Image: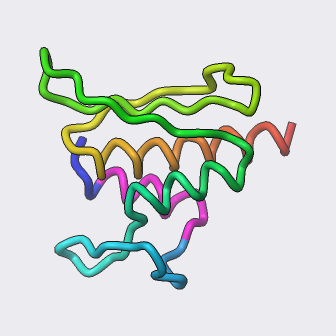
């Protein structure tokens, strides 16, 4: 997938880099949240994010849970940044869809 695709997905949810607190910058100049900021964003949605390295496939799995500890979703990425940014994009889509329906 790549970090650039994860950032595209995040921006497609309406997230903007106007508040660059806790952000890094992609080589194309776009800001994106660091893993710490992603964790804070999940907390503001009432969820927690966990990240682990899967050695067998040399990838990272980001999983988020609600306040009861119930799994809400998971994604994988080549780097922790890619996985956390993509996880945030998917969680934001889920929250937006849930609110709309």
Is the magenta region chiefly helix, strand or loop?
A: helix
* Left or right: 57 in relation to 83: left
Q: Is residue 44 above or below residue 11?
A: above
Residue 79 x %, y %: 21, 44
Residue at the image point whose x is 72% and y is 49% from the top = 45
Left or right: where 78 falls relative to 20: left
Q: Position of residue 67 (x, y in %)?
A: 74, 33
Question: Could you tell me which quadrant the N terminus lies in?
Answer: top left
**In the image, residue 80 lies at what x, y percent?**
28, 45
Is-magenta flag for residue 70?
A: no
Q: Residue at x 40, y 30 (%)?
A: 75
Residue toward you, 86 or 55: 55
On screen, residue 30 above or below 61: below
> In this image, 87 relative to 4: left or right?
right
Total tally of numbered discs in the picture: 0
Q: Position of residue 57 (x, y in %)?
A: 14, 20
- Find the magenta span and give its range: 5-15
Residue appearing at x 41%, y 52% in the figure: 85
- Residue at 47% x, 27% y: name it: 74
Q: How is the image coloured?
A: rainbow
Is residue 13 covered in magenta? yes
Q: Residue furthest top?
A: 56
40 or 91, which is in the foreground?
40
Q: Is residue 24 above or below residue 100?
A: below
The quadrant of the picture occupied by the C terminus is top right
């Amino acid at each position: 997938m790549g970090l650039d695709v994860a950032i595209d997905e995040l921006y497609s949810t309406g997230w903007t880099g106007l508040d660059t607190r806790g952000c890094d910058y992609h080589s194309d100049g776009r800001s994106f949240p660091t893993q710490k900021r992603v964790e804070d964003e999940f907390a503001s949605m009432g969820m927690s994010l966990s990240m682990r390295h899967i050695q067998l496939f040399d990838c990272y799995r980001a999983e988020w849970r609600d306040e009861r500890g119930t799994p809400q979703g998971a994604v994988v990425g080549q780097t922790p940044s890619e996985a956390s940014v993509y996880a945030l994009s998917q969680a934001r889509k889920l929250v937006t869809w849930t609110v709309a329906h």
